[in-house]
Image (cartoon, rainbow, N blue to C red):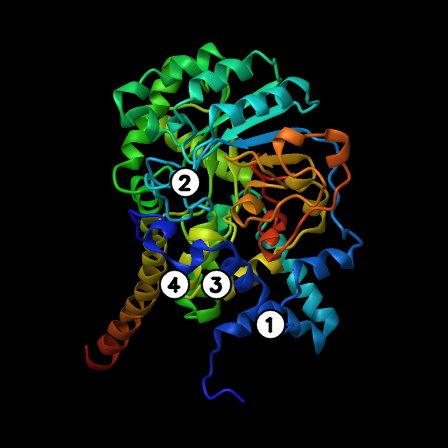
Amino acid sequence: MSKTYYDPADLRKFGNITEWDEELGNKFFDYYGKVFEEGALTAREKSLIALAVSHTEQCPYCIDAYTKDTLQRGVTKEEMMEAIHVGAAIKSGATLVHGVQMMNKVNKLDG
Amino acid sequence: MATATKSLKKQGSDLAQSNRQLEILSNGIFQNGELPTFKNKISETNQFPLKAKKLEILQINVGYMCNQVCDHCHVDAGPDRKEIMTRDTMRQCLEVIKNTGAHTLDLTGGAPEMNPDFRWFVEEAAKAGIKDFIVRSNLTIIRANKKYHDLPEFFKKHNVHVVSSMPHWTRGKTDKQRGDGVFDKSIKALQELNAVGYGMPDSDLRLDLVYNPSGAFLPGDQASMEKDFKKALLDDFNIQFHNLFAITNLPISRFLDYLIASENYEDYMYSLVEAYNPAAVENVMCTNTLSVSWDGYLFDCDFNQMLELPVNSKVKHISEYNEDLLEGRNIVISQHCYGCTAGAGSSCQGSVA
């Protein structure tokens, strides 16, 4: 057993999850593949969204995968960093907007 | 990547030796069975041995001298390379050009324009009336010295199809791969080519760009990249061109050196093998192309030329050229060939699948 929780080489083995449940695994990968096809959004736009979400989910496999994927699509460093700031802004905004709940509660208890 | 100023050969690097490169490509992950060899992979779909079909493209490397020292260069070209095709060898090539059934003549280098007999060769070759006459120009050569400033007019006069490298539409990514100042010079050269009619939507003067990644990753979809390149170059610099060829960097020479030094070699080989596409094998360029080296020897492709893997045929040199004897020969392969079969495939004309 590995002594670390994450091993970069495990990303290559992602497809192996079908070995223990072929039907659900295949359904997932079919869905996943379809989601990233060109549609109303370009594959490039989807890749940038995925890169931002990879960071908000703090998934190291996803960060590796979508950093490479965005590079392959000609995305620049500046665009990549802006995308993850969008993710970070939503994360911090989602924290701070709960401040209103805290304020409501304070006002009720101690207003 | 950081741009070097000397070729691997001049630096005395181990990797300047083709046998050292072939050793690396055959050992390690390909020897211990972690990844299948290219031969085993194409055997799975009964595509081994790869056979040469009818010749369509004759690619001639007129010398390894170049005004640039690009990080990814599979030729290990640079100002310090002295291998240059002589006029005698060019004459032997011209005999073949006049008689070949190939529809495309493709001149490459180094910077082909730096060969002192380049213009003579183009003038003579153009007379053969080959349908598509390509010169692979690095663009900056047009701005490098006064004596090259008239190249756009010269290309136009001989109806040359210009194919030029342009790794990205931004300065940073281009200069990182090709050297400081290359982006600005390339933009100026493209504007000059446009000014004489190259690359304009209705023009017969063909101007295509070659995109290859600036690091250890594969090229994206060619059509999407072309759309992005066209928009950016038109919006930012009022530049137009016809097609974009997305080309995969093959793990040889300077790019192999970079992969090893940056500890990306194994991951890159995994990426190539995972992206293997049997449909690309069908149309891989070595099956319809012949590559001629500066000294007249024959190879299945420019990459095999750099790895010093000659054609598997009795005919070894342009002076002995015989199209019938070369057709049907077994193509010489190694693990670098995965570069041409990944994803949509890769060739000097871009995607193949």
Residue B167, numbered label: 2
Q: Is residue B254 above or below residue B164?
A: below
Q: Residue furthest right?
A: B46
Chain letter of the residue beneath label 1 in the structure image:
A
Residue type at the position of mark 2 = Pro
Location of the C terminus of chain B (image quadrant): top right
In the picture of the structure, the residue carrying the numbered disc 4 is B261
Residue kind at label 1, given as amino acid type: Lys
Residue shown at 77%/51% (left/top)? B47
Q: Residues within 10 Å of mark 3 (few under 14, many from 20)?
A: some
> What numbered label is drawn on residue A13?
1
Q: Secondary structure at mark 2?
A: loop
The circle drawn on residue B265 is 3
Give residue B24's position: percent from left, percent from top.
Answer: 52, 64
Residue beneath the point at 44% across and 59% down:
B259
Identify the element where label 3 is drawn. Answer: helix
Nearer to us: label 2 or label 4: 4
Q: Which one is in front in this view, the residue at disc 1 or the one at disc 3? A: 3
Estimate how packed mark 2 is, as few (under 14), some (14 to 19) or many (20 or more) residues with alpha carbons within 10 Å: many
Q: Is residue B331 left or right of residue B154?
A: right
Q: Earlier in the sequence, mark 2 or mark 4?
A: 2
Q: CA distance from mark 1 to mark 3?
A: 19 Å
Q: CA distance from mark 2 to mark 3?
A: 21 Å
Kindly indicate whether the residues beneath marks 3 and 4 are on one polypeptide chain.
Answer: yes
Residue sitting at 62 percent across and 45 percent down? B310
User: Residue B106's image quarter?
Assistant: top right
The Cα atoms of the two marked residues, 3 and 4, are separated by: 8 Å
Specify the subunit that label 3 lies on.
Answer: B
